[in-house]
Amino acid sequence: MSRPATFVPPPGARAYRLGTARGEFAVIEAGRPSRGTVLLLPGFTGSKEDFISLHEPLAGAGYRTVAVDGRGQYGTPGPADDEAPYARAELTRDVLAQVAALTDGPTDRVHLVGHSFGGLVARSAVLLEPARFRSLTLMSSGPAEISTSQQERVKLLRDALAVMDMAQVWDAIQALEPPEDTEDGLEEGLDDRADLKRRWLANSPAQLIATGRQLCEEPDRVAELAALRLPVHVLSGERDDTWPVPLLDDMAVRLGAHRTVVRGAEHSPNTDRPLETARALAAFWDGTPPAVDA
């Protein structure tokens, strides 16, 4: 479970509901698009707050950043007992609707960033409509299904959600977790733990079940993505048990992608080392083609 430093948007950022052709989505937005617009998709059990420490440095680099809660995630409601709205095709169309709402027309393109499961959805959106994107960053997101150990954890969660409500599952997760270590930042205040619980309870159980299944069944689509010749950035921490780092290294080679390993970070470099992550993102985007084709 990702642990953002805070759930409070930084100065200059605003939280609002983005209206699209497929409904409203909770977002946090910051910055002006002098160098481009960036759409950030969170991972499994995560939320838009996972990118909260990236907004200020990326705004300072000239980028407009928009982090979004997907359907059924935290601030964006979704059905609690129907998995159909969380099929990959539906989540992909949601992303394309968000892009349309954030741009001025079909030739106006955005940088897309997906963390973990968000990277799989981001890849699907790029493969469906590549002309809407300037680049794709796969942040701690691999070529296919997650590792065997993580598949086992996801199966346990899905089994629990089938017989327990969200509050009961939260209590069970907390009972199994080791005592908090200070590196997570949770020692800064009790509100952090309350925020994490509030986010968990707001997630749709059907969304978690459906997306958990997708994490365990994802096919390898690297060759399809490489064929697009879109600028791709593979960014990760130096340790990751969801998709091992050597697997991410190999994916980057297959894609001909820019590769960044953020030292001192694990599966969530966006929360572990946000300043280093922001610098790597901005440096990559600065080298991509303009937002609007001539």
Image (cartoon, helix red, strand yellow):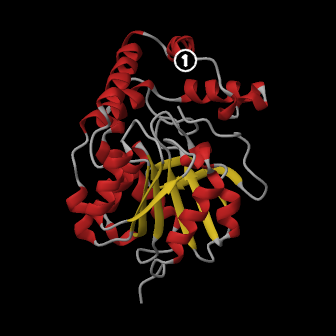
**For the view shown, which residue lies furthest in the bottom direction?**
294
Asked if residue 266 can be seen in this view, the reply is yes
Q: Position of residue 286 (x, y in %)?
A: 54, 76
Describe residue 213's horizontal placement relative to residue 13 as left or right: left
Residue 206's image quarter?
A: top left
Query: How many neighbours does mark 1 have within 10 angstroms: few (below 14), some (14-19), or many (20 or more)?
Result: few
Q: Position of residue 237 (x, y in %)?
A: 49, 48
Describe residue 32's horizontal placement relative to residue 166 as left or right: right
Q: Position of residue 171 (x, y in %)?
A: 56, 12
Asked if residue 142 can be seen in this view, the reply is no
**Badge 1 amino acid:** Glu
In the displayed structure, 36 sits above or below 164; it is below
| Residue hosting label 1 | 177
- Quadrant location of the C terminus in the rendered image: bottom left
Q: Secondary structure at mark 1?
A: loop
Task: Kindly identify the residue that appears in the image at 65 percent across and 49 percent down.
Answer: 52
